[in-house]
Amino acid sequence: MAQRVYLTVAEVLAIHHRQSETYGGSHGLRDVRALEAAVFRPQTGYYNNPAEEAAALMESLANNHPFLDGNKRVAFDATHTFLLMNGFTIEADPVETYVFMVDAIAEGRFRFSVILDWLNGHIKAL
């Protein structure tokens, strides 16, 4: 099994900056500890595979709200980047992805198991 590669806090900050420049919104970090907790969660050794680690990352970045704006965009982009770094991609229609994330968050069901189910249906090996 190949050694897993994880995102750093600096890389997620760069993703947020790029997302803010591209799509607009407020720049800035609301809570550095929330960001660190989200970034380091997949690295705890608790998860069994990249899909579980990706679900943990996505859930934490979206729900911890470490940034002033763009938390959902960063959550998806960082999760996809993590998967790409580890030999996987997410194949999903952008509108379907948006609807999944926004609806799940609005309905209070954006949780690890729901995210993992969605990712398992959309992750493909490179």
Image: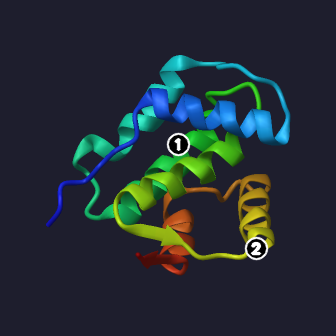
Residue at 56 percent across and 29 percent down: it is: 13
Q: Is residue 114 visible?
A: yes
Q: How is the image coloured?
A: rainbow
- Asked if the residue at tag 2 contacts the one at tag 1, i.e. Cβ–Cβ closer than 8 Å, the answer is no
Residue type at the position of mark 1: Ser
Q: Which mark is residue 105?
A: none
Residue at 65 percent across and 20 percent down: it is: 29
Q: Where does label 1 land, which residue?
A: 60
Q: In front here: 13 or 57?
A: 13
Residue type at the position of mark 2: Glu
Q: Where does label 2 land, which residue?
A: 96
Q: Nearer the viewer, mark 1 or mark 2?
A: 2
Q: Residue 88: give x, y in percent of width and height.
A: 41, 69
Which residue extends farthest right? 24
Tell whether 23 sits left or right of 16: right
Q: In front here: 62 or 109?
A: 62
Q: Quadrant of the N terminus?
A: bottom left
